Amino acid sequence: MSDLPKISLPEFESTSLDLIPALVEELRASFNANRTKSVEFRKTQLKQLFYLVHDHADRFREALAQDLHKPAVEAWAFEISPAKDEIQRAIDSLDEWVKPEKPAGIPFFPFSIANKPVIRKEPKGVACVIGTWNYPLILCLKPLVGAIAAGCTAIIKPSEHAPKVGALLHELFPQYMDPMCYRVVLGHKEEAERLLQCEFDHIFYTGSAGVGKLIMKAAAEHLTPVTLELGGKSPAIVTRHADVALAAKRIAWAKFANAGQTCVAPDYVLVAKSIQNEFVAALEKVINEFYEGKPQESKEYGRIVNEAQWTRVAEILDKTEGHVVIGGNKDISDLYIEPTVVTDVAATDSLMESEIFGPILPIITVEDSAEAVKFVRENANHPLALYAFTGENKTEAEYILDNTLSGTAAINECMWQLAVPQLPFGGVRTSGHGTYVGKASFDTFSHHRSVVEQPKWMEYLVGLRYPGLPGGGYDH
Ligand code: NAD
């Protein structure tokens, strides 16, 4: 746990089922009354959200430590700091984002100028943001920033599996945010289902593909658009051109941060046969360096979120027919699973059945990048992320990108695509659809309304459309 002095945190208490529809109705009334429309109001609320995080950073750090044993440095680097940065960027950019777009005119096409075509950025309405537990703060707040910036009212439902963070958000929201416009609903499956019976104008969901399907079904009842941020088996490909030591360090960092419970963590590695031994030795070296040889005692290493997840991950490790070459120790009393590397893993192995979402790194050998590409296409067609360690060989990196499809990708790096704020983030098909982060979030919660106007004098031209040419029904 964290070294900081104990800080008191509220208890998680589910929102009453009867209250949920009433809250949604209240938010709809506020939206219909244009309460969230002005840019000034949106900026004020974004500033309030910034201070909600800033003023209580220590409490969020403690809540993350209690929910996930999240090391203080991870709480700061992956949750608190990026949440504040995202809010700040939205405040700084909002005047630009809300400007109506004027499409460039088309030469010799008179309507393209005379009709003054414009794309207005309209708030969609009442938004619902459903978050998951692995990054419980940022995965609720980042989409919410987009909803506020776009001028929507919004309900957020944090995950019940990170109860301290959820309860803290619930306590702080009425103190900082306009309660007529932004609310936190706490609860489990039942409360989530009640929420989804209500009519929203956009639903933003982060979590597993199984629940993602239920979200789409519920949204279909009201024809509500959805953004789905799901997971999947994200491969890392390490070719013979890679800087092996650097690849091992970056892959190990991404895989073992948050004890492997990261949607964009490399799920498994496809490594060129000729460098496998060198790669495994490099992994062993960095894992020892990261956690000083004692991960269970290290302040830098997290835990599995709860017993159910621990059991799931432990079982797939127990069933593997591969060779555990690094780690392998587990301790349910501490929800601990050691950073583990498994070699000689077959495509049919228990570790390859579904997303691992834990600190186990299977290694599969391939002859070359062509075989790696074939494996990805056959086994995990639409991962959320793909990582290609090809060293200085840019042709090989292009080849891998050209022949695979993933939500996002990085060359010679892992997870860094999320650190670049001008890049939209999102999955493709089974790893989700729709994007967010920065302007992409604003666009997700905005409707881009195309508008034209027709001057009276244009009747000389447009009058040609009427029946009974020439001149149609226009009275000269
Ligand atoms: P979870 O169990 O916390 O579920 C997510 C949310 O769905 C929770 O708020 C939960 O209350 C709600 N929920 C549960 N059952 C529901 C139902 N029947 N109807 C409506 N809502 C329901 O999280 P999880 O599903 O274990 O999430 C882990 C998955 O999330 C992994 O696959 C991971 O890759 C993915 N993930 C994706 C991203 C991303 O950005 N793409 C980020 C983090 C995690």
Image (cartoon, rainbow, N blue to C red):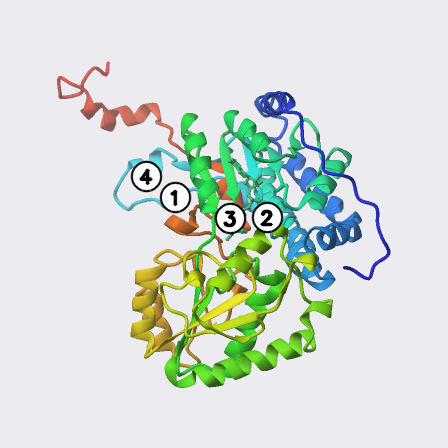
In three-dimensional space, the C-alpha distance between marks 3 and 4, rounded to whole angstroms, equals: 31 Å
What residue did someone put label 1 on?
103
What residue did someone put label 4 on?
112
Mark 4 and 1 residues: CB-CB less than 8 Å, in contact?
Answer: yes
- Quarter of the figure with residue 194: top right
What residue did someone put label 2 on?
139
Q: Position of residue 82 (x, y in %)?
A: 64, 56
Mark 3 and 4 residues: CB-CB less than 8 Å, in contact?
Answer: no
- Asked if residue 359 is positioned above or below residue 175 in the image, the reply reads below
The nearer-to-camera label among 2 and 4 is 2
Dot 3 amino acid type: Tyr
What is the number of the mark on residue 173?
A: none
Dot 4 amino acid type: Ser
In three-dimensional space, the C-alpha distance between marks 3 and 2, rounded to whole angstroms, equals: 11 Å
Q: Earlier in the sequence, mark 2 or mark 4?
A: 4
In three-dimensional space, the C-alpha distance between marks 4 and 1, rounded to whole angstroms, equals: 9 Å
Q: Earlier in the sequence, mark 1 or mark 2?
A: 1
- Asked if residue 24 is positioned above or below residue 280 in the image, the reply reads above
| Element assignment for label 2 | helix
| Element assignment for label 1 | loop
Q: Position of residue 222 (x, y in %)?
A: 43, 26
Dot 1 amino acid type: Pro
Q: Position of residue 184 (x, y in %)?
A: 66, 34
Q: Position of residue 247 (x, y in %)?
A: 50, 77
The nearer-to-camera label among 3 and 1 is 3
What is the number of the mark on residue 436?
A: 3
Q: Residues within 10 Å of mark 3 (few under 14, many from 20)?
A: many
User: Ligand 1 within 8 A of label 2's CB?
Assistant: yes
In three-dimensional space, the C-alpha distance between marks 1 and 2, rounded to whole angstroms, equals: 34 Å
Q: Earlier in the sequence, mark 3 or mark 4?
A: 4
Left or right for 313, reference 102: right
Q: Residue furthest right?
A: 5
